[in-house]
Amino acid sequence: MHVMHKTGAAGTPAGYQVRFQQVHVNDGAELAIRALLDKQQFHDPEGLAAAAGITAATWPLFGQVWPSAQKLADLMQTYAIAGRRVLEIGCGLALASLVIQRRQGNITASDCHPLAESFLDANALLNHLPPLAYQTGNWGRDNPALGEFDLIIGSDVLYERSHPEQLAGFIALHAAPQCEVLIIDPNRSNRSAFNRCMAGQGFVMSEMLIDAPLHDGSPYKGRLLTYLRAA
């Protein structure tokens, strides 16, 4: 991953600084990504954070390029998506969604963060892609416009104790009768609780260790968690 430069830019939300990065993806492809400059970026005069249930400390996290998101983008570069309606949950900067859009897949990105859609639109433009479908996806609330999906994907989505139960319930509402769920998890302690919650929703789980370094040589340790439910 290469940081091209750090600066504000036209179209950046007021009160924020951003940086532009080239993020390598498997098979030699790269994504141009506009991200928040750092984890201290917080400007919320209208109280959107409180309304969305997001703390000031966690507010900037959506706008960073995370290692597990890079691993999910790598996976989506070659994963079987033809004929499947795909949902990325907690998408943040939505690297995986951008990869699927580049492959002309049927992808909807979702997040609870009020700024996620504007960054998604900006990054689609940077990569010369048509606009992506986006829907608010708040795991603890109703999301009636979201619908059902055949493949649900996410990365590093189990970092709070409330997430396993909330996320499993959200997935159950938006999974088609026959559905596959893929989660890249950096060995979070909430993984076991999530496995139990998904089993309660009728999903059978398997996992694969991931220990290959990132494309820039940084070490990575995690798991690909796969959950299957038959019709």
Image (cartoon, helix red, strand yellow):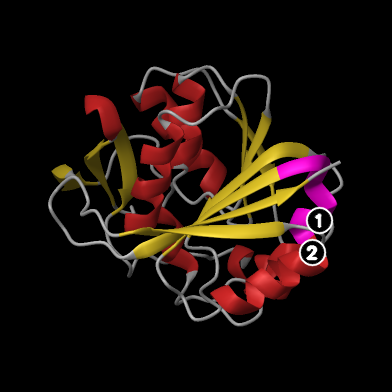
Query: Is disc 1 in contact with disc 2, using a CB cutoff of under 8 Å?
Result: yes
Q: Report if residue 175 lies within the magenta region.
A: yes
Residue on which disc 1 sits? 172
Instruction: Answer yes or no: is residue 11 visible.
Output: yes
Q: Is residue 146 placed above or below 44 in the rendered structure?
A: above
Q: Position of residue 219 (x, y in %)?
A: 19, 62
Quarter of the image for residue 164 reads bottom right
- Does 210 sit left or right of 131 as displayed? left
Report the Cα–Cα distance between label 1 and label 2: 5 Å
Quarter of the image for residue 46 reads bottom right
At x 82%, y 62%, the residue is 201
At x 55%, y 70%, the residue is 158
Residue 169 - label:
2
At x 59%, y 67%, the residue is 49
Q: What's under tag 1, amino acid-wise?
A: Ala
Q: Secondary structure at mark 1?
A: helix
- Does 138 sit left or right of 64 as displayed? right
- Does 19 sit left or right of 80 as displayed? left
Q: Position of residue 170 (x, y in %)?
A: 77, 59
Q: Position of residue 163 (x, y in %)?
A: 64, 73
Q: Secondary structure at mark 2?
A: helix
Q: Position of residue 136 (x, y in %)?
A: 69, 48
At x 49%, y 81%, the residue is 189
Residues drawn in magenta: 170-179
Instruction: Answer yes or no: is residue 30 visible.
Output: no
Q: Is residue 145 placed above or below 207 in the rendered structure?
A: above
Q: Quadrant of the N terminus?
A: top left
Q: Report if residue 71 lies within the magenta region.
A: no
- Does 196 sit left or right of 34 as displayed? right
Q: Could you say which is closer to the camera, residue 30 or residue 4?
A: 30
Mark 1 surroundings within 10 Å by alpha-carbon count, few (fewer than 14), some (14 through 19), many (20 or more): some
Q: What's under tag 2, amino acid-wise?
A: Gly
